[in-house]
Amino acid sequence: MESTLPSHTDVLIVGAGPAGLATAVTLLTAGVKSVVVLDALEQGQNISRAVVIHAQTMEELDTIACAAPMVERGIKASSLLVRTGNTPLLRMNFTLLKNMTRFPYATLISQTDTESALEDRLNALGGRILRPVSVTVIAPSSDPGATGITATLADGRTITASYVVGADGARSFVRKAAGIAFRDPKTNEDPYAPDADTTSGWPLIIADVILSPSAAKYVSESDLSTLLGPRGFLLLVPLPPLKDDPAQRRVWRMSCPPEPDNVNPPRLAYLQTILDAALGKRKEKVTVEEVLWSSRFRARSAVADSFAAKMGSGTIVLAGDAAHVHSPAGGQGMNLGIRDSIALARALADILGFPTSAPAASASSAVSTKSSTKAPKIADGVDARLRAYSDQRRAQAIAVIKVTKLMTWATGLKSRPARRVRNAVGWVLGRPKKIEKRMAFRLSGLPAGVQVASDAGKSTNASISGTARGEKTHQPKETSASLQNGAAAAQNGTGEAEKVTDTGVQA
């Protein structure tokens, strides 16, 4: 992999967030060395943003030797709990997935630490990120002696690539350069268009805070908790202490509706009001002692019309937020993006003559999804493996958009009668163990019918390290084989097989 800008590369990755980094690491692990990663920022993410890694994402990360440091750094959450006051409504119990994954939990870890682990692996494989570097033009190569796509940088330098990966976020420059439309599957509108309705989407607050030690008495430090109170919902996620905090205090992610007067950043007093309303009267008060970081934003949903397109003799492919965005409900976004990237990198490696032991997507792969939104036909000339990648990952993105919209709507109900009905339905649905497992399964992203060996929970990094040497190792089939097999049976809480879609709520 290049540490200085060459004139040509096989794969140019624009964006060094989790999606771009996972693409680069997977390519390098497969043996592809002609890879360049560019990022416009001087340094990586220094705020938490995405904070949950689900089981299937961890399975995929383990194939590129990145799971172990994330598991070690993060908190293993056994459940996602939904409650109102002291009344539990729903529990999504990840521990019930122990026969389906080596990671029967949700790993709670800041995006900063996730990116750090991916970049450490990138560096160990000989890769580097070139930053700060901005791309200003992407066009078919005009050099008579070159083929592919030429990217022009802000300082005038150019680089030509056979494949350009757009991992540059929701307002992706790469996607726009390729002329790929980006729109909400329901409204058909682009939420990021210059003339878009700025009031569209769900307004939300996210904040990383320090709570008083009394919080541990009323909120689990080993679960994700959604508290439904009279002031709306409050999501509380425990996170590891900051590495540079001498007191090593627990960090909490708060997410809730915004202040009525749209104050940004949110005030500590408002966060305290939401916390008080969600927890109700307690013997010992829980206080917001410090706000480390906060932001107000609108959760919008959109998906690219295709994740792959020809540009001259080269190909542009999209991954992560450049391909799809949606509500953060359920912690699905970064998971979907990382798994996009690993699937994409396997397909590219196969095309470039470096097949991995996990089969790349094939043109005959069948996607089992109940989505009614059909992907537009991709232009002729796109490799069949990239066409399959686009079809499969786009279908999964639409499925996630539908579910996260439903989750956001349900938690955001404002009228008291509607909340009462929601709570009553949640209480009834939340009783059976079968439901606990099914909901956890859908959030986990695991492919239907997956089973693992009896050494569940053990890291396979030693065997994965051998992958580059051609040794056989376990590889999750979510990106290929499971999609080819279509809908399969997953074990329910009673041990009986029930039919589910292959994608479920996979992220």
Image: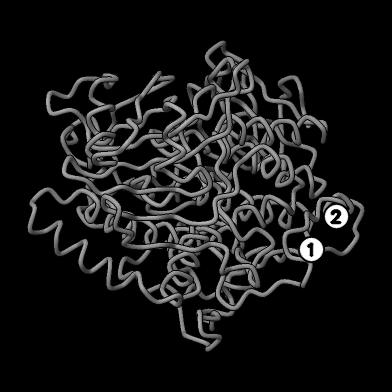
Question: Residue 106 versus residue 252: which sits nearer the camera?
Answer: 252
Q: Is residue 319 visible?
A: no
Q: Which amino acid, by three-letter code, is at mark 1? A: Ser
Q: Which amino acid, by three-letter code, is at mark 2? A: Thr
Establish if 170 lies above or below 399.
above
Question: Which quadrant of the view contains residue 129?
Answer: top right
Labels 1 and 2 touching (C-beta < 8 A): yes
Q: Is residue 368 visible?
A: yes
Mark 2 or mark 1, which is nearer the start of the sequence? 1
Residue 8's x, y, as percent? 71, 30
Q: Which mark is residue 357?
A: 1
Q: Would residue 142 appear left or right of 303 to someone viewing this image?
A: right
Q: Would residue 39 appear left or right of 411 to someone viewing this image?
A: right
Q: Which mark is residue 297?
A: none
Establish if 139 lies above or below 433.
above
Residue 59's x, y, as percent? 67, 57
Q: Would residue 174 appear left or right of 5 to someone viewing this image?
A: left
Q: Residue at x 31, y 72 (%)?
A: 429
Toward the bottom, the furthest residue is 496
Q: How is the image coloured?
A: one colour
Q: Would residue 385 appear left or right of 263 to someone viewing this image?
A: right
Residue 179's x, y, as percent? 39, 41
Residue 348's x, y, as percent? 67, 52
Q: Residue at x 54, y 22 (%)?
A: 46
* Residue indicated by mark 2: 467
Question: Residue 479 versus residue 9: which sits nearer the camera?
Answer: 479
Establish if 83 lies above or below 97.
above
Q: Secondary structure at mark 2?
A: helix
Q: Secondary structure at mark 1?
A: loop
